[in-house]
């Protein structure tokens, strides 16, 4: 890895890739395999999971016994370095009345170094939402266009899971998935209760290996469920670009990575083409330019948007690739809400090893499409529940107000007896949710920052209220004690951005007048500028986005490589 300034010998790249997370990692892997010379510019610092991950260090080795602090919200050993909910010297602002959170992992590999790894496939309805309910817009592509890329991505990154066999939840063809881990006891109890109410519970699809994945350059091992995944995974069981795509792409000899390189704008050349980018060496503050025949922006939804908005000039006062006026609009995140209960039947359960993988083994996919079609629900689109319930310190709400030996006994008894159902749902884009450049504030490099506006609509509030009723019905069926007070949806829904699924601010479409890119991420206005992250999504879906980001980045990279071969950039 090169840090900061670029070695002049490496400057003549075919493609500049901005960002090294899920989208940038896939672009580097696919484009270098296709024979293209790539220069990757990453704003964060270099990061080596083999040398830096403290998989086995006891919490007692850490300050405050590893507890979360404002700069390490997931604990001292968390894999996110150089970023998080706040990045030093790189603020963002909000319109009055907005509460928006923006999580940035400023490091090689981006947010793939610590993520939840829940990777459901999207289904046919998710790409054509307008046709179904008249809200938002349809994608210019459908499930059948993306399915072959899902098949390949699942095999490439290593996904475990089982069959779903439900409407709008397409199953993977044989050979795509690794076997799922066995359900945990709490999951089996939730399944029995939920299914008696007609609510399905299915194996989750997770980007964690349950079988070894041999490779000459980046061999990865099956998960042995030993340590918290938030610290990162030195054995390579969970998918992150730093233990897979990046070393593989480097091994081709065609990838140069420059870390600590904060790209500030796309530089335009002749004939309406991008000539390269300008970036700031974070360590020295010195500005550099790098040139290439094509530029890929994969800096994460909102950073990619910021780059476009900051790359305007006299000819393009509203920002680059923004003739539609859609850059920054249509910002969505997933809805979120958490529900917990104490299950007396599980009190004092015997201690045993809950083998499997880190995170949930089972989840509840959305199951009410037919009721929705018949108009029986007061919200559009879906939600799912991620399931929790393992040994550990129980929440305070599950403990009596006693102390000393009685408290110790209560903690031991309740450990493993509390369960959680965490809702993630689809938000419909609305005109009050967007990001734009703040005219008054710049970051420490002098780059104008983003200002967010965000609002949930009644649709999302109704959806969360429905989820609350569902979770409570399942808990009651288990004779469990609900641990959270009954609050209205506006009090329990997460803040915008908090679920870290921000999408849509440079959306794709079939018409350049109402969209920013085509279905391959190519901007309508600049033929050699391609976007590959969640900015290009035409809508959200309740299903987590990263498998789809990876599939679309693979599809876009292969298209870009074909265009190189056909002489489009000669
Ligand atoms: C705690 C957590 C849990 C999550 N759980 C899930 C989950 O279960 N399922 C799921 O699907 N998704 C999940 N996500 C979201 C997932 O991580 C993202 O969708 C995914 O990483 C997005 O990939 P990306 O390449 O667009 O962005 P990132 O992975 O964020 O990568 C962007 C990279 O670009 C770099 N960059 C930014 N600006 C610049 C610039 N100006 N110049 C140069 N480089 C720049 C950044 O430093 C970063 O390395 C989770 C995220 C977090 C943090
Ligand atoms: S639980 Fe599995 S995936 Fe998570 S860090 Fe441990 S070995 Fe890696």
Image: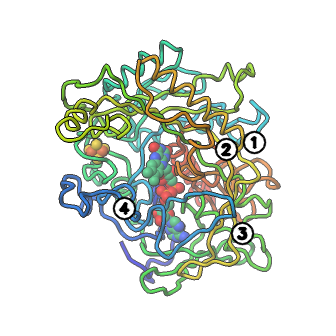
Instruction: Please tell me which residue is depicted at 75% across the width and 74% down the height of the picture.
Output: 271
Task: Give the image's coloring scheme.
Answer: rainbow
Q: Are marks 2 and 1 in contact (CB under 8 Å)?
A: yes
Q: Which residue is mark 2?
A: 539
Secondary element at image label 2: loop
N-terminal of the pair, mark 2 or mark 1, is 1
Q: Which residue is mark 4?
A: 69
Q: CA distance from mark 4 to mark 2?
A: 34 Å
> Mark 4 or mark 2, which is nearer to you?
4
Secondary element at image label 3: loop
Q: Which residue is mark 1?
A: 136
Left or right for 63, reference 137: left
Q: Which residue is mark 3?
A: 320
Q: Position of residue 291 (x, y in %)?
A: 56, 77
Q: Quadrant of the C terminus?
A: bottom right
N-terminal of the pair, mark 3 or mark 2, is 3
Mark yes or no: residue 148 visible. Answer: yes
Quarter of the figure with residue 243: bottom left
Q: Position of residue 80 (x, y in %)?
A: 38, 60
Q: Position of residue 81 (x, y in %)?
A: 37, 65
């Amino acid at each position: 890895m090169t840090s900061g300034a670029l070695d002049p010998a490496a400057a003549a790249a075919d493609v500049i890739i901005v960002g090294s997370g899920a989208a940038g990692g896939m672009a580097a892997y696919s484009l270098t395999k296709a024979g293209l010379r790539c220069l990757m510019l990453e704003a964060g610092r270099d990061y080596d999971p083999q040398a830096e991950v403290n998989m086995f260090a006891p919490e007692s080795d850490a300050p405050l016994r590893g507890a979360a602090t404002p700069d390490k919200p997931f604990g001292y050993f968390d894999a996110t370095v150089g970023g998080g909910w706040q990045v030093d010297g790189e603020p963002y602002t909000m319109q009055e009345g907005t509460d928006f959170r923006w999580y940035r992992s400023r490091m090689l590999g981006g947010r793939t170094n610590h993520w939840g790894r829940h990777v459901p496939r999207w289904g046919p309805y998710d790409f054509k939402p307008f046709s179904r309910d008249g809200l938002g817009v349809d994608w210019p592509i459908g499930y059948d266009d993306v399915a072959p890329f899902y098949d390949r991505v699942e095999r490439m990154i290593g996904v475990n899971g089982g069959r779903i066999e439900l409407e709008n939840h397409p199953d993977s063809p044989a050979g795509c998935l690794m076997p799922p881990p066995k359900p945990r006891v709490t999951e089996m109890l939730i399944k029995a209760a939920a299914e008696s109410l007609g609510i399905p519970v299915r194996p989750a699809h997770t980007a964690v290996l349950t079988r070894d994945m041999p490779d000459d350059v980046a061999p990865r091992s099956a998960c042995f469920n030993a340590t918290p995944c938030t610290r990162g995974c030195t054995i390579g069981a969970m998918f992150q670009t730093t233990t897979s795509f990046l070393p593989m792409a480097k091994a081709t000899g065609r990838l140069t990575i420059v870390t600590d390189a904060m790209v500030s704008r796309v530089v335009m050349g002749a004939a309406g083409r991008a000539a390269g980018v300008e970036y700031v060496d974070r360590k020295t503050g010195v500005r550099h330019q790098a040139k290439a025949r094509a530029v890929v922006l994969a800096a994460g939804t909102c950073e990619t948007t910021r780059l476009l908005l900051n790359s305007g000039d006299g000819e393009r006062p509203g920002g680059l690739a923004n003739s539609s006026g859609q850059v920054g609009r249509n910002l969505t995140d997933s809805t979120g809400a958490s529900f917990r209960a104490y299950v007396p039947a599980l009190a004092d359960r015997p201690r045993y090893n809950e083998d499997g993988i880190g995170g949930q083994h089972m989840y509840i996919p959305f199951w009410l499409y037919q009721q929705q079609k018949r108009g029986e629900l007061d919200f559009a689109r879906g939600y799912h529940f991620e399931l929790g319930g393992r040994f550990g310190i129980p929440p305070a709400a599950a403990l009596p107000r006693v102390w000393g030996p009685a408290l110790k006994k209560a903690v031991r008894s309740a450990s493993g007896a509390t369960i959680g159902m965490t809702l993630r749902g689809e938000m419909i884009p609305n005109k009050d949710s967007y990001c734009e450049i703040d005219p008054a504030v710049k970051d420490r490099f002098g780059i104008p920052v983003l200002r967010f506006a965000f609002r949930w609509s009644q649709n999302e509030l109704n959806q969360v209220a429905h989820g609350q009723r569902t979770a409570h019905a399942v808990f009651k069926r288990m004779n469990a004690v609900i641990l959270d007070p009954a609050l209205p949806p506006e009090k329990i829904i997460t803040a915008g951005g908090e679920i870290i699924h921000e999408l849509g601010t440079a959306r794709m479409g079939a018409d350049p007048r109402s969209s920013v890119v085509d279905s391959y991420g190519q901007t309508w206005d600049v033929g050699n500028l391609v976007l590959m992250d969640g900015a290009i999504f035409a809508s959200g879906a309740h299903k987590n986005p990263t498998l789809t980001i990876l599939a679309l980045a693979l599809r876009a990279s292969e298209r870009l490589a074909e265009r190189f071969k056909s002489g489009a950039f000669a």
